[in-house]
Amino acid sequence: MNDRVPDYAVPVRRRMTALAATATNYLVLTVGALVYVAPILFMIVASFKPDERVLPEAGTWQAFFPERTTAENYGDVFERVRFGRYMLNSMLVTGSIVGGGLVVNSLAGYALARLQWRGRGAVFRVVLALMILPLEAIAVPLFYETTLLGWRDTYVVQIVPFVANAFAIYLFYSFFLGMPKELEEAARIDGAGVWRTLVEIILPNAKPAFAAAAITTFLMYWGLYLWPLMVTTHEDVRPLPLAVATFRTLPPLNWGDIMAFAVMMVAPVLVVFIIFQRWFVRGVAASGMKG
Amino acid sequence: MTRRLNDNTPTAWPLVLPAVVGLVAFVAVPFLLALFLSLTNLRLGSPLPLEYVGLRQYVRIFTAPSFQRALVNNAVFAMVVVPVQTTLALALAILLNRGLRGMAIFRTLFFMPVVFPMALVAVVWELLYAPGSTGTLNAFLGTVTLGWWEPKAFLHDAFWALPAIMVLSIWQGLGFQMVILLAGLQSIPDQLYEAASIDGAGKLSQFWHVTLPQLRNPLVFVVLLTGILAFRVFDQVQILTQGGPNDATTTVMYEAVTAAFSRQQVARASAMTVVFFLIVLAITLGQRMLVREEREVA
């Protein structure tokens, strides 16, 4: 794994083996990367092809190297459906879950990790127990509960149930638990109250936890399909994952349009992902460390 | 002041209250509601009065062929996807961890589908799975097997539909597990490998005796996560096959949602989600036991 031996000390035969190993390494990764890139490239290329050519050419080289390209499909998407509205809905819903969640869950995580209070043990046990409940396990009764509240076809029903998040609370809890106590104690001795200590000392030092929580909640809710399928019937509040599936069933079946929709849907997130990739990787890795 | 000096009860409660209210109202209450409803006969629009029926809903779902098939499908999905995806993720993580040039680009490529919503992945792969010799995957397999491959209607074929769903699920999820395992690999101290190598351990022996034991917790986590995901499968099935052909791709969640929404059988759907929860619970407890055992050894 870690060949730290200086080059001159390595016999020629071992160097040849190392070279072969490196070559195999690259070869395997390249083949894997092709498998990974092909569907994405296919999607992008198809979005720029005339509709009638997408399906007939799907099994030829033209699926990846088109003869004729057009941006027509992109215009067609906007003519046929309210793409901008879906994008707005998705950003509003996911943004509110992430933003609201950062406030609510970080405060709870902090109180659990750092403060002494009556009920702490009970709340902590509830958080741990609820962490293992996936949305699917409660989706049906949650649907009836929110319907009774009169929340169908709103943003509220897509946001409010997911703001408090046991997993995010635990993530903040373990981060605050590992933070050195000295800073806080110094602030307390200087007479700062809990709130001032929190705003001036804790929050500025907790950026990695906020980034990890933001990214994991974003990944959890950006692609949500089951829930909006259950609670929305109106396209005014419909988010992108549901909209792309609905667009696919909307006649006439134009694969070029569908792929243009797909590209526009994923492009903004992909750009953000590539710019902040390091944070995404850390966020996901941090969630793995919790175990 | 009668309170202990370090008691923060009045300040702490406002901090946790929003989270506690949210979790109780939208996680705990619905969960208890699921348990309760699963013991009733609730069906929306039915003239029958609501009554307690004991475990009758459970008996009904376990004797329904489509639900049995759903459980089998989820189990097959888990038994195939968990080992395949974990092995592939581990292999990629090890290759990426060798410190060669250009690894960041490869990591980006493999991790990219993680930001693709499953609904989008399903729609794109539907086109790749197009039936007939002009379908992308059919044409590719035809070329590499020099014409031996007979074109399949992947998503409409009782044998191929479930594997087709598995492949696109692996494609989408692999990067996530890979990143977790890569982080695990990077936290293994170099000294362990040096010591093993001084003791004369070869690469393979180092993998068995250093890498795997050190990677135990992330591996257990990845297996747990993939195992649970295997029982949550819904989006791709609803979009691509609607559980068909002949229940070949139906899943527990697909059955539950169809019961609740196409047939208004709320009680029956609740019983299915309770079964789903028990499976998730079993997987989680299994993981906790594995991790605890390791902690005791350490």
Image: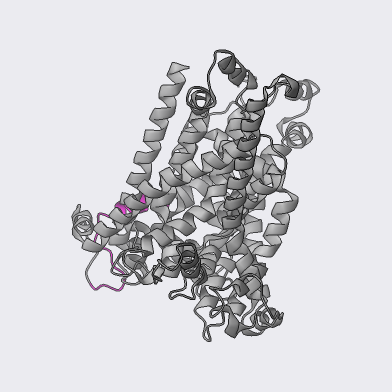
Residue A182, position as x, y percentages in the image:
74, 20
**Residue A91 visible, this orientation:** yes
**Residue at 61% across / 79% down in the picture?**
A257
If the image is split into quadrants, where does the N terminus of chain B sit?
top right
Please provide the residue range marked out in magenta.
B30-47
Q: Residue at x 53, y 55 (%)?
A: B172
Compared to residue A61, the image places residue B184 above or below, namely above
Membership of B35 in magenta stretch: yes
Residue B278 within the segment the image draws in magenta: no
Image position of B109 (left or right of A187)? left
In the picture provided, is A261 more to the left or to the right than B68? Answer: right
Q: Which of the 4 image quadrants contains residue B189?
A: top right
Identity of the residue furthest to the front in this view: A12
Hey, which quadrant is residue A140 in on the image? bottom left
Q: Is residue A168 something one can see in this rendering?
A: no
In depth, the one of A59 and A220 nearer the eye is: A59
Residue A230 in the image: x percent, y percent?
A: 45, 67
Residue A221 x, y percent position in the rendering: 57, 56
